[in-house]
Image (cartoon, grey):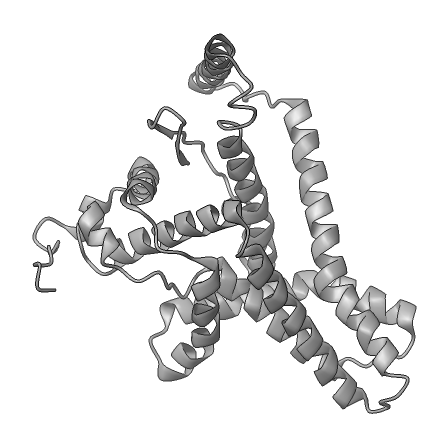
Amino acid sequence: MAVRKPNNEIEVVTHDCKSLMHKYKICNLPIIRGVIAFGESLVIGTKIMTYSASFFDDEEAMTEKEREKARKREEKKRERQEKRKAAGKPVKKDSSDGLFMAITITLSMIMAIAIFILLPMGLSVLIGKVVKSHFVMSIIEGMLRLLIFMTYIYLISKMEDIQRVFMYHGAEHKTINCIENGYELTVENVRRQSREHKRCGTSFLLFVVIISSIFFIFIRVDQVLLKTIVRLVLVPVIAGVSYEVIRFAGKSESKIMQAISRPGMWLQGMTTREPDDAMIEVAIASVEAVFDWKAFLGKEEAKVPSQAE
């Protein structure tokens, strides 16, 4: 993780990420690996956002001495962790941090399920008193879910703080595209790249919405309570299937998969913004901390575009 601090320095922090998919073979099976990847991404993403925000929490209210003390506490904590790691001992986790993380993720999941799964279902149940066709009702529920999702994305994209997050999101995409397109990782080269990427989390969420609608067309349950339970139980399965779709789409160059990926990439027009050069520098720093892009490209293969390009 790289974050630009209030003093304009870029702080880079790296941690080992040991995925369950690398520990247990069963966790690397299709569908299951999607559930694991989704859960781990949620945890890691929440940790990173919380940590980056800590650099600015009460920044104006804190004195310079207080900020220095906080920085030293964090450095000492990191040094203790590094010493334990070097000695082969397990790194102790802060129980309060773990509790906060668990509460945050749990509340996030509850809100997501309530807004994007239960709310469309509830509205469709009301409409179902007039429309009796299961197929038509499933289509209506899917359209309501898509409408709610699109409205949610549109509304948060208008928030000033989220707009900055989306600018960094754009910097992330541009940086990855720069490497995958074979260019050296410089601010100028990154700036030229597209903000769209087929493996984006925005596309994943759109796939979840669409695939869930397809699932519920073929699964008929009339009782409201049982219908609610079925939808909750299927959430991990839908996430797993969506992961497989976006994983395959990210590797395939076929026209069919490009067409399937296109709606998600259009939606990225709302969830990404053009970053400034300072944001691009942060994105480059985060990549360079964990990935040897020069070895990936090869000295002879790296191509530097001319001004005409």
Which quarter of the figure is the C terminus placed in? bottom left
Which quarter of the figure is the N terminus placed in? top left
Residue at 10%, 48% in the rendered image: 299
Residue 228 in view, yes or no: yes
Direction from residue 106 to residue 161 in the image, left or right: left
Q: Nearer the viewer, residue 241 or 157?
A: 157
**Image location of residue 27, percent across then percent down:** 58, 53
Image position of 165 with respect to 123: above or below: above
Residue at 64%, 73% in the rendered image: 146
Image position of 294 with respect to 130: above or below: above
Residue at 67%, 68% in the rendered image: 148
Direction from residue 41 to residue 291 in the image, left or right: left
Image position of 204 with respect to 79: above or below: below
Residue 31 in view, yes or no: no
Residue at 45%, 46% in the rendered image: 164
**Image location of residue 23, percent across then percent down:** 53, 44
**Image location of residue 125, percent across then percent down:** 86, 77
Direction from residue 101 to residue 68 in the image, left or right: left
Residue 102 occupies quadrant: top right
Image position of 27 with respect to 216: above or below: above
Residue 155 occupies quadrant: bottom right
**Image location of residue 273, percent across then percent down:** 40, 56
Labels in figure, total: 0
